[in-house]
Amino acid sequence: MEAMKKKRRIIAIIVSLLIPITFYIGDFYFTSKIHHFEKYKTVEPTEKEYGHTLYKCKHCGMIKSDNYVEPTSYLMPNIVINEVCGANDSLLPDENGDCFDWIELYNPTDRTINLLGFGLSDKKTDLFKYTFGDVEIKPNGYLVVYAVGDEVLESFDTNILYANFKLTSKGESIYLTLPTGKIIDRITYPELKGNESYSRFEVNNEVVYKITKGTPLEENKEFVTVKPPVFSANSGFYSNPFMLYLESESDTEIYYTLDSTEPNKNSIKYEGPILVKDATPNENVYRMKKDTTIYKEKFPNELVDKATIIRAIAYDKDGNSSEIVTKSYFVGLDKYKNTNVISLVTEPDNLFDEEKGIYVKGIDYKEWELGKKEGEAPFLNWKNRGFLWERPAEISYFDKGNLVLEQKLGIRIRGAGSRNFQQKSFNVFARKFYDGNNRLLTPLFNELSFPKSFILRACNYKEGFLQSLVSNRSISTQKSKPCILFIDGEYWGEYHILERYSTHYLEEHFKINKSTFARE
């Protein structure tokens, strides 16, 4: 009986295997014997779609596809890896102010190329570590991809991309792959130092690579160092006018400005000493900007005190430029020598331009005021927050007439309702990508270390006074001291230099490691 059951099970297994085999063979037989396929139509490949050939059965009309051809964009000159920066210290910060290593892609063609489905990777065995979405690069356009590893980062800007792998400064290979899995470009870069990149050049129709200074989103250039101009006098207070001399390397030319704008080849060419004198008789310019408040405030009727601001740059014969040097000269303004003075110098458009200026209402709000826009009031420029609304500035700090700090820093508008007044407060940040330092070069308060940020608060003596009354108790207070602020050379008013509550503040005052609390 058991033998019979076992035999039946074996027969059932054999039958179950024979049925699909029979159907497969039958389908193959009838398809090949009964159907008679003839070439029906050829679909040419497009830039994004595969081409193929259609075949039609002359008996039943069945259609099948075969002979697939890659999209034309896959066969034409395509995107290249243009530059790799595997040791980024301070170039191209993202919208949060972070400086990640990056890969720059370039479109050398005369057509827009969509990267949908393309792969980017540092491993040949895993070519699609990062897969592009619906992103386009215009003709002769650039695209930078930040290599951040496993960090989950997102951006409101669809042109800011974060790849899920990291680069090493020791050198490795990077692969760019078509959706088909075909590698279309590869670059193997050597060991790189801070802010160096491995860049692609075409020389006599041949592609060569060189170590250069990083030039993200720009044409690659070989690294040429041009020393900045040397000033014969430092920033400071001077009782009498004097002649200022500028010097630079041989075969270079110096250009300078007197209105706080950044100099370039269209600026004043230096051809001899510059007379530096009291600038107070000059007309008020920035202090008279009326779109810096929503209230009916008074603006100065008289000339305000002014410093002479000189910004200079050097160019060599090939157009390579130096860093910009900025100096602030207070001539005949000895009355400020017994207090703290800060000269804040930035490209005026950083503050007062209707599109990007952080100190003004902005074009959208002004049009709404004039009735050109309906609905609720648009966001005021000075209400914007975050790194995208931070601007670079040269800060010179004088303690009783002595220059104690001269550094390039970042500034943002600070406060809530106080932002609506013409005299606004600032948050000030030290960051590596401004000058290679993430701390101020000088402590602002003798008993504290070098801060990473501080506040320039539009004068409110009450706050500083009240905090001083309880500073000896077991509660947190901010150290402060008064100062006079000049913006782009013009007297701006009385301010307070104030400690800023931050992770660094907690480390400094309470000796708490920042890894134990949330990121600011």
Image (spheres, rainbow, N blue to C red):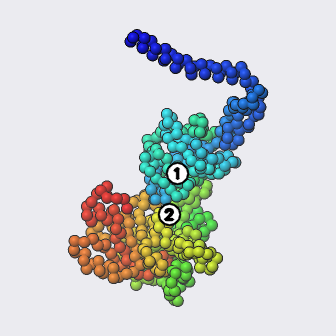
Query: Which residue corresponds to mark 2?
Result: 388
Q: Position of residue 17 (x, y in %)?
A: 52, 19
Q: Tag 1: residue type?
A: Leu
Quadrant of the rendered image containing residue 466: bottom left
User: Image point 46% across, 40% down: which residue?
Assistant: 171
**Secondary structure category for the residue under label 2:** helix
Of residues 100 and 90, which is closer to you in this image?
100
Q: Pick whichever, 138 or 484, lies toward us.
A: 138
- Mark 2: give few (<14), some (14-19) or many (20+) Cα within 10 Å: few
Residue 223 visible, this angle: no
Q: Residue 161: which numbered mark, if any?
A: 1
If the image is split into quadrants, where does the N terminus sit? top left
Taking the image as shown, residue 142 lies to the left or right of residue 418, namely right
Three-letter code, disc 2: Leu
In this image, 437 relative to 173: left or right? left
Residue found 44% across the figure and 70% down from its top: 395
Q: Give how far across and how far down residue 424 sits, in percent.
A: 45, 77
Answer with mark 2 or mark 1, whichever residue precedes in sequence: 1
- Where residue 372 appears, as percent x and y from the top left, is 64, 76
Asked if residue 335 can be seen in this view, the reply is yes
The numbered dot on residue 333 is none
Percent across and percent down for residue 75 are 67, 37
Q: Is residue 290 above or below residue 91?
A: below
